[in-house]
Image (cartoon, rainbow, N blue to C red):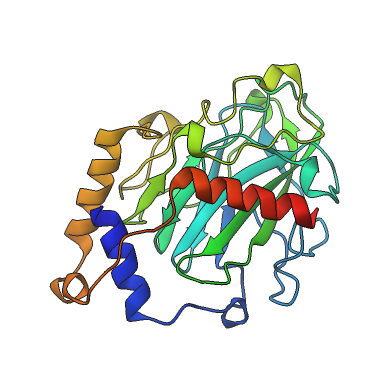
């Protein structure tokens, strides 16, 4: 509840942004490196209208992703496709829970366990973020991708990149309320893996040494309460007093509505 109040207060304090306000994707991969961004095509599925970029090596297991949010975001979903140049939204499969709300800042978390998902070294893969602006009544969906080539963990040399959680709010849906998409790349190896094989930190922290230091919070009432407490602590008195409204849509309804919209557009 407190996290919702802080989000609403922040949204009330500033006009809802437009995609044309940004020169880079307002929610984007910091690592792996993202594809190019164009505001005019950011709503084009599956990758915001951008062609594949330079591929970087990425481990079959034990990899991390880093996401940077430059605005309040909602319904953030991370997916992958084991294709060089996926052209359909349904080429992608989900691998973690929906982030219902995310404030400005960085979020670092484990990437897909490609080995557990049946992938092999040498495979090209594409990671996808879909997101919406928080508090935007028209609520368009935007897309951004990153391109990798899978390698054995022993052959992977992790580059230097910031891995920290600085978003004051990270409200994560329970698996039952998350968007789940079994794309054309879905195999039996993924059965039961969606929303269950990634841990997510709900509170800001210092740079993380390893994915194992992240706290699992999906569907956890105590973890969500911790996130709300952290968010409240970071809010100024004036922001709290500015007046806030609770989120009106339930997590499950939001995920179903987003899935329906995507199915119609694909």
Q: Is residue 206 left or right of residue 72?
A: left
Up the image or down, 72 lies above or below 197; here it is: below
Res 74 visible? yes
Q: Quadrant of residue 44?
A: bottom right
Image: 81 above or below 20: above
Q: Position of residue 70 (x, y in %)?
A: 48, 68
Q: Can residue 53 be seen at all in this image of the molecule?
A: no
At a point 26% along the width and 69% down the height, the residue shown is 244
* x then y, percent, for residue 51: 83, 60
Q: Which residue is at the far left?
A: 237
Please report the residue visible at 72 percent of the width from the left and 30 percent of the height from the top.
151
Most foreground residue, 221 or 167: 221
- Residue 216: image x %, image y %? 38, 31
Give the side of residue 68 with respect to residue 207, left or right: right
Left or right side of 178 for 186: right
Picture coordinates of residue 188, whole percent (x, y): 74, 17
**Which of the 4 image quadrants contains residue 84?**
top right
**Nearer to us in this view, 24 or 247:** 247
């Amino acid at each position: 509840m407190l996290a919702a109040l802080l989000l609403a207060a922040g949204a009330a304090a500033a006009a809802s942004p437009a995609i044309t306000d940004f020169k880079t994707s307002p929610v984007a991969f910091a690592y792996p490196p993202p594809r190019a961004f164009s505001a005019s095509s950011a709503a084009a599925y599956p990758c915001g209208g951008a062609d594949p970029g330079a591929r970087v090596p990425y481990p079959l297991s034990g990899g991390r992703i880093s996401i940077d949010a430059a605005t309040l975001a909602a319904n953030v979903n991370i997916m992958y496709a084991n294709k060089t140049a996926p052209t359909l939204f349904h080429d992608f499969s989900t691998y973690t829970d929906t982030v219902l709300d995310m404030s400005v800042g960085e979020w670092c978390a484990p990437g897909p366990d490609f080995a557990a998902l049946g992938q092999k070294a040498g495979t090209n893969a594409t990671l996808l973020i879909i997101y919406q602006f928080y508090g935007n009544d028209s609520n368009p969906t935007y897309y951004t991708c990153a391109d990798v080539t899978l390698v054995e963990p022993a052959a992977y040399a992790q580059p230097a990149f910031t891995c920290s959680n600085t978003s004051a709010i990270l409200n994560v849906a329970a698996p039952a309320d998350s968007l789940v998409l079994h794309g054309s790349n879905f195999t039996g190896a993924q059965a039961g893996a969606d929303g269950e094989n990634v841990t997510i930190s709900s509170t800001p922290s210092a740079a993380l040494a390893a994915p194992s230091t992240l706290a699992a919070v999906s569907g956890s009432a105590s973890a969500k309460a911790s996130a709300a407490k952290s968010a409240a602590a970071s809010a100024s008195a004036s922001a709290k007093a500015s007046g806030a409204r609770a989120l009106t849509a339930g997590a499950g309804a939001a995920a179903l509505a987003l899935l329906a919209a995507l199915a119609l557009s694909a």
